[in-house]
Image (tube, coloured by chain):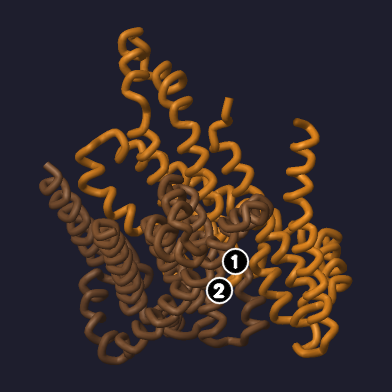
Chain colours: A orange, B brown
Amino acid sequence: MAARAKLNQAGVMLPRIVAAVVILCAWQALALSGLLFRDVIPPLQDLARGLAGVFTSPDFYANLLVTSVELLGALLVGGAAGVVVGLWLGGSRFAAAAFERWIDYLGPTPKIILFPVLILMFGVGMQSKLAMGAVSCFFPIAISVAAGLRGVNPVLLRVGRSFRARLDQKLLKIYLPAMVAPLLNGARLGFGVALIGVLLAETKLSKQGLGFMVMDAYQHFDMPRMYGLLIVSVGMAAGVNQLLQRAATPTKT
Amino acid sequence: MRRAAAVFGMACILAVLALLQMAIQAEWIDAYVIPLPTDMLASLPRLVAEEHIVARFGVTFGETLSAGLLALVVGVALGAGLYRWPRMRRAFEPWVAVFAAAPLVLAYPLFLVLFGRSSLTIVVIAFGSALAPVVLKTLEGFTAIRPVLINVGRSLRMRPADEFRMILMPAALPHIFVGMRLALIFALINVVGVEFLINLGGLGQLINELAERFDLPGTWASIGLVVGVSICFFVMLDGGERWLRARS
């Protein structure tokens, strides 16, 4: 059994290693071929240097802090609004019939186009980026919370009523545990879109933050640094997304 | 009750706009930040006449369609390939899932360097964002096929190409439609977003230009217009998917 599992593992790893090696070799060959402008596709050693340079530069940590504060603020503001609206829509059939369609359809529209009016409302500083992230994460969180509340098993609610559970007991012992998966899913989607919103807003108009650093590297044509920053920010977003997705998937017992 | 609720929802939105109008007229809200809703509405005919809305709509729609269809063709082929070779699937399906979660649009400066400030950049980013959902949905579709259908094909000694054309594809179509709908939605979001960010092309650029000219009623009206166009597009896709599902 163990030998078979090992064989399976090898069967999965081999194609992955081959694919990774082929991609890296193709990259290096293209970089050294001179077919493209110098540094558009930097050689792997420059790329590694660029990536290491990101982590060793003090600028990076200062800008990461700015982006993190904006992101955290966005998740707090947009998340709180999303939870309140989601609970309202999930708890009232009339409210859902009146407004949920609007939220569903506004949800997937590209939010970055709101950035010019957010700048007018909140200025060119951190607040407008925070607002951009908050608007982005409001929709998936509201939709997930509403769906989660509607999905709570009615038997659990009846059990709560038959035990005469108080409101706080119902919230903590019935609703919250039953809604963990949709809440985490909402948090995952919300985090992803809030990060995209904040970083895109920073690339458009900003003097600080990771998005600004990417644009700064682009404007100075410092490609290895730009690649390094993109690997870090895209990797960070994809990593957190995967972690929350794993947490939201019920474990099989 | 549903109809009454829908009418109530619409009435609430109109009431908020009316309140906004009053608040701006009473100067509680700065008209330089939020212009009068009636001014926004009044600027629509001007936008249509002076800003080549129809041509811009065509550009955005063309880019969305090219990226979405390209993602459909490549995604179905990749999905079918991963289904055909289970070992590859075990190895690379998690990679596709990570790729689906990676916000490719953040790398738009990189695509600007690679492809220049052109429609190609916009289409490539939109294609990249739309590809993973098609691959995953295609795989999901093939996996959900009842084994009896495949066994029937085998008992009739179908060639692999015929099995694919006559059994696998028709049975997986509903899932592939879902993938196609997601692809077109992701494509539209990315096309409009990147048009706005790099100030090039259709509807996204319009918003950027009007904002840079400080034409606020125009900016708000164009945002409303883009949101409206997106919503129409999503409603049409929903309807299309339901229609195709009913026929398949």
The answer to whether mark 1 and mark 2 are in CB contact below 8 A is yes
What residue lies at 42% left-to-right and 71% top-to-bottom? B188
Distance between mark 1 and mark 2 Cα atoms: 7 Å
Residue B72 as seen in the image, left or right of residue B96: left
> Is there any visible trace of residue A90 in the rendered image?
yes
Q: Which residue, as the protein is rendered here, is positioned at the far top?
A: A163
> Is there any visible trace of residue A121 in the rendered image?
no
Above or below: residue A146 compared with residue B233 = above
Q: Front-most of A95 and A62?
A: A95
The reply to whether label 1 and label 2 mark residues of one chain is yes
Q: Which mark is residue B125?
A: 2
Crowding near the residue tagged with mark 2, few <14, some 14–19, many ≥20 C-alpha atoms within 10 Å: many
Above or below: residue B129 compared with residue B242 = below
Crowding near the residue tagged with mark 1, few <14, some 14–19, many ≥20 C-alpha atoms within 10 Å: some
Residue B203 as seen in the image, left or right of residue B116: left
Expressed as whole percent of the image width and height from the top left, the position of residue B124 reads: 56, 77
Q: Which mark is residue B104?
A: 1
Expressed as whole percent of the image width and height from the top left, the position of residue B148 reads: 42, 45
Q: Front-most of B243 and B36?
A: B243
Disc 1 element: helix
Tally the marks.
2
Three-letter residue code for mark 1: Leu
Q: Chain of mark 2?
A: B
Three-letter residue code for mark 2: Ile
What residue lies at 39% left-to-right and 19% top-to-bottom? A170
Q: Chain of mark 1?
A: B
The image quadrant of residue A206 is bottom right
